[in-house]
Structures are given as structure tokens and as C-alpha cells.
Image (cartoon, coloured by chain):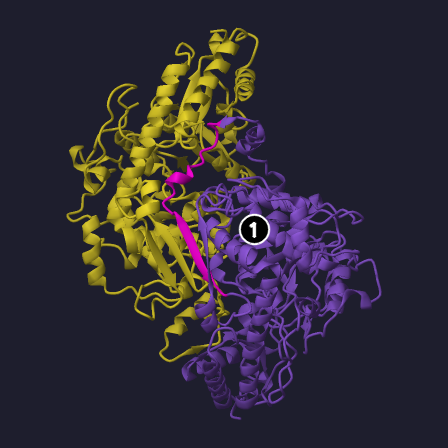
Chain colours: A yellow, B purple
Amino acid sequence: MAPPSAVSYDIEAVTDTEAIVLPNPLTVNGVASRRAKAGKLVAGTAAYTSSDLFKSSTAGKPKAKRWDHYFSIETKSRQPSSLKGAAKYLKTPGLISLGGGLPLAENFPIEEISVKVPTPPHFKEKEAIKTGTTLSAGKYDVSEGKSVYDLSIALNYCLGTGAAQMLRWVTEHTEIVCNPPYADWQCTLTVGSTSALDHAFRMLCERGDYILAEEYTFSSAVETGLPLGVKFIGLKMDDQGLIPEAMDALLSNWDVVARGARKPFVLYTVPSGQNPTGATQGVARRRAIYKVAQKHDVYILEDEPYYFLQMQPYTGPNAPGIPPPSSNEEFLRSLVPTFLSMDIDGRVMRLDSFSKVIAPGTRVGWITASEQIIERFVRANEVSVQNPSGISQMVLFKMLDEHWGHGGYLQWLINLRMEYTSRRDILLAACEKYLPRELVSWNPPAAGMFLWLKVDWRKHPAAKTKSILEIEEEVFLAAVEQGVLVSRGSWFTADRENFVHTELFFRATFAAASADKMSEATARFGIALRDIFGH
Amino acid sequence: MAPPSAVSYDIEAVTDTEAIVLPNPLTVNGVASRRAKAGKLVAGTAAYTSSDLFKSSTAGKPKAKRWDHYFSIETKSRQPSSLKGAAKYLKTPGLISLGGGLPLAENFPIEEISVKVPTPPHFKEKEAIKTGTTLSAGKYDVSEGKSVYDLSIALNYCLGTGAAQMLRWVTEHTEIVCNPPYADWQCTLTVGSTSALDHAFRMLCERGDYILAEEYTFSSAVETGLPLGVKFIGLKMDDQGLIPEAMDALLSNWDVVARGARKPFVLYTVPSGQNPTGATQGVARRRAIYKVAQKHDVYILEDEPYYFLQMQPYTGPNAPGIPPPSSNEEFLRSLVPTFLSMDIDGRVMRLDSFSKVIAPGTRVGWITASEQIIERFVRANEVSVQNPSGISQMVLFKMLDEHWGHGGYLQWLINLRMEYTSRRDILLAACEKYLPRELVSWNPPAAGMFLWLKVDWRKHPAAKTKSILEIEEEVFLAAVEQGVLVSRGSWFTADRENFVHTELFFRATFAAASADKMSEATARFGIALRDIFGH
């Protein structure tokens, strides 16, 4: 499946599920003038903050629907913290606080943190080491007029939204990329999308509930839900991921008594470069899914770690590659529109993560959803993870906000796009060279890190007597024997109890191994398959 | 209440709740030779690790009790991750993995992180700025032989235990300080104690359960439990915190039918510098509480953020202070023994945090408990927070392990002890000077950040017609009017529904304001009180 070519919002007919096209959506260049108008960001230790402080005017946009009817008992019973209620008095001029137990910055034994990062456009590691820029944060940069964020703030406590300085950046980025079409959207930082998913499931589900998902899905999502008593129900997929008609049919025919559960109202989906199948939903597909969600009043969890790993169209083994987008604008236009960008109802929680595009070890991500959802989410943060590491936030702020800016970040993402395109193409070339085509088939992924290999189990010599899972295990172990580890497709089934395997899949990643090793590994997998299938 | 003077384990009679005194407990100096014996630490990206790799021999120690009978449905139903099951194959020599989607380090746009920290013993901020040491971590320090931990590891994914390099440090530190008397204790890193508490409540409790706690307690702990349907039941306190006889009486007389809940089996306690009362349990008190816990088979959550904020004995307003401990050994001996150090049954989860002793913004802490508990906790981490920020872990590792070592860290803690002693003494002197002693009384806290002020509401002109809560509000607002914020005692009641207020308290912290401001704030509070009470 080739990735959709540059799609712009206005070439399709406007329906009620369309994004509203605003006269002046925020652009990279628009950020500077908006910040200038807003005045200097003043946000000290544990300062209250909100995306509302950083958004464009939302005049003319509708307000999000309310979701009270889906909230779990746990979520409904969250009260604001009693101590935080005292925060309003802190604004009293001249007040001295003996209230909160915030340690003094002078007792933090960390005087300065520096980070060396690439200077755009010299992103390649070797260049970055040579020409990179070292960015430093001191304890008192704010009072010394050097920055709006310093270690006295970052090393202290912080509210459940994350620091204002990083929240501003993610809010602006989200508006540039998604421009949500309803008024009261907000962002809040997370300690990563797995934690955000855990929060989301607890916010929306009770024991016994079903969540909709692709029939093969991110196994950690399933494993996050299962101990909560939440089961996944898999929806049929094609090369663009989940099939909206399958979702509609399932929901239209849901039998509460037979299923022993209320009708599902949460969809968990990975729209771009889906894990494990690598499938990417095109824009028409997304609109169709959104429409089904509206019809059945389904809330969408849009998990998008791979959104910016959308790659160049695949041109084949020997064809020349396509040059990178020539500008940030062209790059943004080349991306499939997000669910958030068409979310007229405020029925989407979008989960963004720096894990795949900066580094997993930052443990920083963010979500975007309606104000009501964000408020409940922040309350949950306050009594659990609190906020991401201030040290991580500082490193990201220095790089993304003060050094690269939004434009530099998009340039970095273009660089990463070309990097992943090249790695994907190496794996695809190796597959074409080494794998028995009469046994194995695949779609070139348009996004993500994964190639989904379908093996024709019907050609196995013992296909009539062995189960698909037995053949899967045989292939897996033979591959290990040959010296290559691939993931078994059955590890990713959404429905862990009742799924009937009719096809045999393996997942291979092109993210992790060097070019040489990917080719060698693929050759080994080919040998394992030929051995077993006698081809 | 004066802090207990240097207590050593062996001066008291040995009972079955005593710590076993091992022939060779780990000392600061013993770490080097043990590490040398163990050989170089080899732990790459997302490497499996366990405290067992870093502990002294536990020969002769008993194994912990099992806690299956207390596990919640959620905890019982956690399965190991299916993807992580594949990790065992990664040990196959020569294997190439196309399995896990771990991004390549060359695509992390962070080439180096440096941190400037104090060089022991020059801990004061001004000295640290002048004489501090800059520690740097590069991406490939491990392969270049410069370190056992580098950014290629720290910036990538990590297992739910945290990185081996930091786990080793906290395991050694815990053994030096607590030397748990049972065999199968382990540590795991957390993203902070609030998150760890959230995990612990979910691990042990079902909706409708009661948790035991001090009658005034950390309000966030209560607010973590309430949405889970877990209520707190407050135990009477004196100047050493919770009274074991009150705990025994409550549990002995628990009426399941009248209470509508099973007998409580979890105790949440802050043994040192308790929040909000500042009370510190002495060693005899801790032993008595542990004994009651054994009698009723209660599991103890030992939340100890202030453990190393135990201060010098209070000598009075004009008496000279007591010089700091003259050695690390003397310092360690001066600390009240922990519950963990007397935990022969493995019935304690100790929660440690860097928030009060390094910086809250690190979002790194750890817990220590039996292997069974740690295993369930790590499973929960895997599908929620995953692990603390790798950047935070790296900064802590560079400072604590490579630069300061265990000895330097203890020196830092002695420095902090003297700092907090001095701050406490300033607040106490101001209270003695400015507060009406006929209305206000307090115990000098032996640990922590808080002074608990008891106000004699009976002397209020309208004591017969106003409730305690009304008087509390009146004082609080009058104090704000005068320009000082203190916390209202009622914010900290464990039992939010049925607590009968018989006394009036306010909490003041000596952690946050400068010396001058603390005195000024106290004077203002005195004025507010005199105004209202007419004294």
C-alpha cells in the first residue's frame, strides 16, 4: 500500500465530519508574532497553566460534547486536591507562604544542566557531534533574564499539566499540525503514552467492558486493559487498517445479553504505521471511521507514536527514491490528517509521544482532548505520576523551544522521515531478494517501524494436521535457530480468548538493526521458511 | 519531642521483631570490594536486572511471607508481557533481532548531557557554583570504555525496574541503611512515591476497603485512595505519631457487619517527620507498631520522604547548636531504625524518594519489598509508567554513583540535616518570640519540614457557639489578610467523612521561605491570632 499523496483538507466535499477550515490556522511563522502579542511567559515554580493560555482564538468553533455518561466510578469520584485549593491565596500581594512543603532551590545539588544537540539542518549523528550546539540551563536563568524556564522551576514540584513552558510548545505544535475544529481542546503532558492509556482506560471503563481495536494490535495496550477487567474486541482489517463497516456491523448487532457486556463505546486505534501490521489509514478511511464513531457515540483513543514516521512513497527495489519534502509546509501537507483534525465533537483523545521521534528515555508525551477530559486526566496525574521529569522537560524545552523552534523540529522530522524511508527500503529489498515469494507476502508500510509478513500456512507440508499456531511456533523457533528473532503474529491479537486464527503472520522491525544485519537477518528468515515449507 | 539520641540495634533485648544483626553488614567502604568481586557491570539497552545481582549474601535470613491472600483482582490477573517473553531468545549468540521496535541510538538527537554538581564537602550553593564538578554522559561511553552507563542506554527503552546502573546504587544504599533481615528483598525504581502509593493501593485493595493511617495524614495519600473506593481510618496519635495500642484496639474490635467492610490489613504510615504533624516514631514505637502489625497480619506501607531530614536535637532558642555527626557511621547510627530494618516477615513496602533530598523534579524514587511484591509492582510498571526518565536516571547516576559514591551522598545528607536543623530552629525561635504561648503550643519536630501548631480554640471569644472548623476558617482567612499562608489542619484528616474535630491545628513549613520571611510570617500569624482571640 502506497502512502496517500499530499492531501489537503479542502479538496474533499465538506460534510459534518469535516474539519472546519479556519481563515488563519497557526503556522510555524505565526508562532513568533503570537508569542510577542501574548507577552513574556511568566510561570514560576508549580505555576498553574493551561493550553488556553497558548491557543489561537477559537471563535466560531463549537464546544466539545460532554462525556459524563461514559466516566467510570473512579473518575467521577475524583475531587480536586484540598491543598491545591489553597493555591488561589498565593496570588495575594506580599503574602508569605508557610503552606506548601516545596523545597528551596538552593538545596538542589544540581547547579547546571547542559545538552549537546544537532544544529539544524546538520542532523546526522556524525555532523551533530562536530557541529552540535550545547545548550545550558542554570538554576536562576529566569531571575537573571536569560530564559523563561530554569532549574529552580524544573527541579521543583510541578502541577499535573507539566510545566507551562513545555505545555506552550506542545499546544502550539498540536495546533500547527492538527488545528482541532472545536473550541475547548487542551493538551497536558504525560509520562508516556502507555501511562496515558492506563489513565484513559481507568477513566472510561469498568470491569467487564469491551474496547474496540484493530484485530491485531499493540500488545501492551491489551495487557494494560486486561488486569482492569477490560477486554479487547478485534475489528477486521485490510491494508488501510481497521474496516469501518466491520465496526459499524459489530456495534449495530451488539447483543448485550449474549455478550454479557454493554455496547462498546471506546475505540483504541493506531492510525499510522499501526503496530504490528504497519497499516496506515488514509484520510477517507479516517473520515469513515469517525462517522461510525459518531453514529454509535464511540470515544476514540488515537494512539499516534508513529505519526511522524510517515515515509516517502515506496518506489520499488531499483527505482530512485523520491526527494524529501522541499519545505515544512509541503511536509505538513504530506501527512495524513489526524482524527483530532476532524474531531468536530471533541470525541478524540490523541496520544502523542516523543519516544519514537526524539527518544523513549525522555518519558515525555502529551495528550490532546476536550477540556472536560483533560481536567479529569490532570486530577488523575496529581495522585499518581504527577508530571514528567523536570530534567527531561528542561532538555526538551532547550532543544525544541529555545534552539530548534517549531520549524527546526519539523526539519528534524523530515530528516527522520528520510532515515526511516531508507531503512524500510533496505528491509523491503532484502525481503524481495531473500524471501520465497510463493510463501510470503507483504504491503510496503507507509509509516511506522514494522513490516507485517504473511506466510501462506496452507503450503506447509503438514497444513492439514497442524494448527496455525503450531506452524507459527515451528517457524519462530526455526528462525531463532537460524539466528534471527521476529515477533509472532499471535502475540498481537486483540481478542486473547476467542480469536480464530485464519492466517499466519510475523512482524519484523526495520527500526533496530543496521542495514547489513537487516539483510542478513532476512536471508536467515528465508532459509528457515524454505527448510520448513520445503520450498 | 526531642529526637532519639544515637540508637544502636543491639542495646535492646532481642525479640522476634528485631532486626537480625548480621556478622558483616554492608558498609560504605564495603561497596567497592563487593563491586570488584562482582566484576564490571554489563547491562545494555533494556537489559534485565534485579536487586539480587547487587545484594550481599542472604544466607541465614528467612524468606518473606507470601501475600497472595491480600492481592486485589487487578494484581492477581496481571500476566507477564508476551513480547517480553521473547527476551530470553535475545541471549542466543549471533542472533539478529527484528523483534522489538527499539529505535537506534544514532537517531536520538541528544549527543551529550552534562551536569554540574557540588564536589563534596563543598555543598553550599555558592561554593558549589565555584568549585562544582561537571559530569558528562555521551552516547557511546560504554563501548568507548568510559562508563558502565551511557546515553544510548539511558535514552532508549528500559525495563520496569529502571536501569541496572541506578538499581545497583539504590540496592546498595538500602542495604547500607536498612539491611533488611529477610532474604528475598528487592528494590525497584519508581517515578515517585505518589505513583508508588497509587500502585500499592491498587495492588492490595478493593473498593470498600479501609486503610489504617495516622489520624492526620498526607492529604495526597487520602486523595489517591478515595477515587479507588478506599477509605482511610485515622489512628490516634501522640508526639511520637500513631499509637500502637489504638491500632491494636481498633483491629481487635473490628466489626465487619457494623463497618460494612473487611478488617483492615494495610497500614499507611509516615514514620519520620510525619506530614502534617512533624511527629517521628522512636525505635521502641516502631517495634511496637510492627508487633501489632504481626498480630493482625497487617501489611505496612512505610512512606519515608523525610527519613533523611532527621535533624539535630533541638536545644532551645539561645543555646548553642549541636555539632554535626563527625562521620558517616555516626550519622547512620543517629537515624531511627526503619521498619524495613526490623521487617523479619517481609511485610513492609518502604517508599524512598529523591524529592526531598535531591530534587522533586527528578521524578525518581524507589521501593523496597519482598520479591513477590516487587515482581507484581514491576508488572504494573510495564503497562503504565514503564520506568523513570532515563535522563533523570543518568543525572542521578553520574552524581551519586560515579562522582559522590555512597560516602559522598551521606555527607550531602549530613549537610542537608544541618540546613534543615537551622531552618527549623529559625522558625521555632520566631514562634517563641511572636506567638501567644497561652494560645499556641507545639513540639519541636525531630524530622521533616513541618511544624504542627495547636491553637487552644476553647479560648476563642465565641468558642461556645462556633464550631472548631469555623474558628479554623476564621484564623486561616485572618492570617491571609495579615499576609501569611498556613495550612489548615482539617485538610489532613485521614477520615474525611466521620472525623470529629476536638482540637484546632495549623501546619507551617520551614522548608520554603527564607529566614527573614519565616520570622515575618510568624509575626503576622501571631497578630492574626491575637486579633481574633483578643489576647
Find disc 1 in the rendering and name its residue. Answer: B166
- The correct choice, above or below, for A138 with respect to B200 in the image is below
- The correct choice, above or below, for B428 with respect to A67 in the image is below
Quadrant, the N terminus of chain B: bottom right
Would residue A524 appear left or right of A343 to someone viewing this image?
right
Residue A479 image position (x, y, % from top left):
52, 19
* Residue A80 visible to the viewer: no
Report the front residue among B267 and B511: B511
The residue that appears at 39% across and 57% down in the rendered structure is A114
Report the front residue among B291 and A40: A40
Residue A421 image position (x, y, % from top left):
31, 30
Report the front residue among A164 and B137: B137
Determine the image quadrant of residue B134. bottom left
The residue that appears at 23% across and 38% down in the rendered structure is A331
Q: Give the residue type at disc 1.
A: Met
Q: Which residues are magenta?
A: B97-118
- The correct choice, above or below, for B492 with respect to A63 in the image is below
The residue that appears at 53% across and 28% down in the rendered structure is A496
Determine the image quadrant of residue A433. top left
Q: Which residue reaches farthest bottom?
A: B535
Residue B455 image position (x, y, % from top left):
58, 82
Q: Is residue B102 magenta?
A: yes
The chain under label 1 reads B
* Residue A323 visible to the viewer: yes
SS for callout 1: helix
